[in-house]
Image (tube, helix red, strand yellow):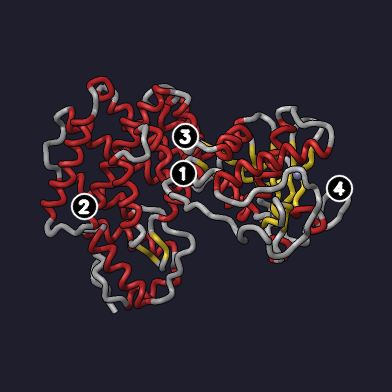
Amino acid sequence: MVLVLGVDPQWRSHPVWESIVQIAGCDPGIESVVHAYFSGWGARVYYNQKVNSVSANRLKAIVEHPKYVVVYGAGSDGVNPTDGKPLITTGGGSITYHKADGSASIYVDVDDARGQHYLAPGHGGTVHDSLPTIVYHELAHAYYHLIGQNPPAYRDKEILARRDENEFRSHVGLKLLNVYDDSDPGFGIPTLGTLGFPACKPTGFTWCNIATVALGSPVARQIVAFRRAKREFERLTLGSTPLLEPMLSSYRLFSPLVASDMQSDPALRDAMLHYGVQPAVHLVQLVRALIAGRPDDMALVAAADREISQYLGELPDGPSTQLASAADAAAAASEVLSTGDESRLSGMWHLPGDAFASVTSSVQATRAESAGPAWVLAGIALFLRQATDRLGGVATAPDPRFESAIGDWLASVPLPDDAVLTDPVELGAELTVLNKTLFHHDANRVLFMHRIRERWPQASAALDALQVDYGEPTRRR
Ligand SMILES: [Zn+2]
């Protein structure tokens, strides 16, 4: 169950993480989530395996094992903690500690011997020992320790780990080690094969974890719609920062936990599909219709109407009877996340509410930024509420108030922390685009401008000077 990468400032976790991604064959099911551990901060690896290979299977076995394997990435001046000797003097710049409690710690030089290239004995020459192969080799030692099958003799341990390393090398097309040769050729240019590692390309649909599990397939048409929307949303910026970035970065942190809850509970998966994923898909489609810039208000009202009708058409009879309570639970979960008041969670631990309780508790457990998911849940609540009203005949189609409410919801998107509002020309252009694409009503624009002025009071003078129609009453000079 537990593979952790040390992420405190003295460790270089990113190259280690990239090696893990290569070992997984760029499986989109691999994720890391930062937690606090007794020894400091660590990025715990979660693996919803989709790729089948020897190395991916090994990784899965380590991740699922209850004992800990912790990997610390260091520079070439990093030291081996038992004797304080530089890692660079150990073969491959790496070492695995087999602890008495059955857990293991790995220390590895991520700088390839200050760029001089670690070498290992091959058949009739030397091969490059790249970071992914080094990490894989050390993980093999750790694995046999975890399962209690490490042979006692050093030489037998090495033969076992080199055999496993060769399986990985063979899978990715690298020259093989001579498993019986324990000499250390040091550093340099290999005489067999090439330098480097034939890297796979990360597929990058980790954003769609929850949706993938709910829909049962990463190629479902809804996932394609999500990915397309992500590209479109990235073009909408404020202070050069994507406006929807807070939502995306928080999603990356908490979604693996929700996805794993869903995998172990089919009822939860169904609730998440009907009340979370499907409304989100239609909400995203609605926002895309706004961005596409339809010419008049009635066209947008019609688009909103179409999404609600399609959603209700897809909803089975059973789940539609619980639509109102799902809407209430989504609104409550949003409030828990934005206020931190957990008292409202108490009534939610039964279906369909626990789909949303699972999201809030995962966000809290991973210490992900909560403003993004709170905002997403508020949008889903708005959508479910409108669908409930339609179902009960309270709202008659098409409803212009719903389109305006969607605009207000968009105008309350969490503002990106690292947005820099210094260039008035750029800011003017960005606000013009946002007003044209997202905020069609004066009330939406006033709300958005009010939030910007509140967040960046020092930008007020620059905003006053802009010739942007942001719906505020004309200012007196
Ligand atoms: Zn070894």
- The residues bearing labels 3 and 4 have C-alpha atoms spaced at a distance of 39 Å
Q: Tell me the CA gap for discs 3 and 1.
A: 16 Å
Task: Please say if 357 is above or below 84.
Answer: above
Q: Which residue lies furthest to the top in this view?
A: 318
Q: Mark 1 points at which residue?
A: 28
Query: Circle 3 sits on which residue?
Result: 258
The Cα atoms of the two marked residues, 1 and 4, are separated by 37 Å
Looking at the image, is mark 3 or mark 1 earlier in the sequence? 1
Dot 4: element: loop
Q: Which mark is residue 289?
A: 2
Nearest the viewer among 18 and 316 is: 18
What amino acid type should be assigned to the residue bearing mark 1? Pro
Residue 260 image position (x, y, % from top left): 49, 32
- Tags 4 and 2 touching, CB below 8 Å: no
10 Å crowding of disc 3: few (<14), some (14-19), many (20+): many
Image quarter hosting the C terminus: bottom left
Position of residue 189 measured from the top left corner of the image (x, y, whole percent): 69, 65
Answer yes or no: disc 1 within 8 Å of ligand 1. Answer: no
Which residue is tagged 4? 82
